[in-house]
Image: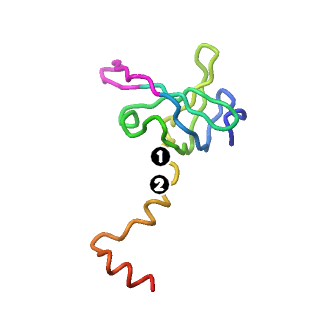
Amino acid sequence: MEIKDLKAGQGKVDIELNIKSKEPERVFNKYGKDLRVANAIVADNSGEIKLSLWNEDITKFNVGDKIKISNGYVSEFNGEKQLSAGKYGKIELAGAEEAELKKPAKGSKKSDIAEKEF
């Protein structure tokens, strides 16, 4: 899936994007609870879109990161499409699964791993 294919109201969005810029976070109170949000501009080869980062996701991701959004949601605000992980989606660094597979198991020594490879 690419940005050019996204439509307002669309759910189940699975996409990989690069973070081009990120605005400072804002805090607001909703139903007696403080929420934090920051907008970022993300892009792929087909274009760019605004991404809403909520709460802990704001500090998890930075400009230059390649991210993967699973089960995201596209909304529209003031005629502009916006992407977010929504209530049921998630955002993670792209390639995070591969990085986890390459890590040695806990308690393993580097020498143990080297021996197993031969």
What is the crowding at mark 2: few (fewer than 14 residues within 10 Å), some, or many (at least 20)?
few
Q: Which residue is mark 1?
A: 92
User: Which residue is most to the left?
Assistant: 107
Question: What range is drawn magenta here?
Answer: 22-37
Is 33 left or right of 65, judged from the image as shown? Answer: left
Is 106 left or right of 23, judged from the image as shown? Answer: left
**Tag 2: residue type?**
Ala
> Are discs 2 and 1 less than 8 Å apart at CB?
yes
Is 10 left or right of 26, judged from the image as shown? Answer: right
> Foreground: 83 or 117?
117
x, y percent for residue 102: 44, 66
Is 30 within the magenta?
yes
x, y percent for residue 18: 55, 38
> Foreground: 61 or 114?
114
Q: Where is 11 relative to 101, above or below?
A: above
Is 118 within the magenta?
no
Which quadrant: the N terminus? top right
> Foreground: 87 or 14?
14
Q: Which label belongs to residue 14?
A: none
Q: Which residue is mark 2?
A: 96
Residue at 42% x, 38% y: name it: 61
x, y percent for residue 60: 38, 40
